[in-house]
Amino acid sequence: TEVAGSVIPLELLERLGRYQLIIGDICKKLRAVKMVLLWEESILSFWITAVTLATGLLALCLPWAPILTYTGRAVVWGACGPHMRYVDRHLAAKRARKDAAADPVLHKKEAAARIRREEAVKLRAAKCLRFGKFITTVPRFNLARHVDRPLPEFTA
């Protein structure tokens, strides 16, 4: 196996790099949720609170006993009724036809997906060559890791 400058194999570094990107995306999403919950993104937090409050007030006025009774009956009849025998026959026939014609179509889709991925990798490499260290993504939220709150004794 090829080995990088350190003792860690390149296959492990590639795999860990993929996980690092996934964990980085998760951290960005969690940071955005934290900012909404702590009212650092005050406009979005306000609208979420207002919509939740309005929905709660509307839910107080609804007659829940008949709504839940008839909804439950409709769900059970729709999911477990006698018509499901015909649905099963239809789906089994459709699955048999689909399996017979899937091989050429699946092969074409796999080839198209591979070509799209290769084009995306080429485009990314070209952007890295063209823009170098200046390539970056601009966040849509104020995703500061540490919130800068001024002290009460300071004035602007």
Image (tube, grey):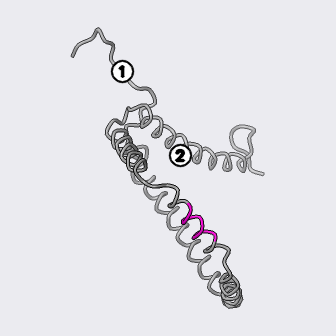
Q: CA distance from mark 1 to mark 2?
A: 26 Å
Q: Residue 42: horizontal and vertical position, in percent?
A: 33, 35
Q: Residue tagged by mark 1? A: 149
Q: Residue at x 37, y 39 (%)?
A: 45
Q: Residue tagged by mark 2? A: 25
- Badge 1 marks a residue whose secondary structure is loop
Q: Residue at x 47, y 35 (%)?
A: 34
Q: Is residue 111 above or below residue 137?
A: below
Image position of 53 (left or right of 89) = left
Q: Main secondary structure of the magenta part?
A: helix
Q: Residue 48: horizontal and vertical position, in percent?
A: 38, 44
Regarding residue 48, the answer to whether it shows in the image is yes
Q: Amino acid at mark 2?
A: Asp
- Badge 2 marks a residue whose secondary structure is helix
Quarter holding the C terminus is top left
Task: Pick the residue in front: 45 or 73.
Answer: 73
Q: Quadrant of residue 81?
A: bottom right
Magenta stretch? 69-76
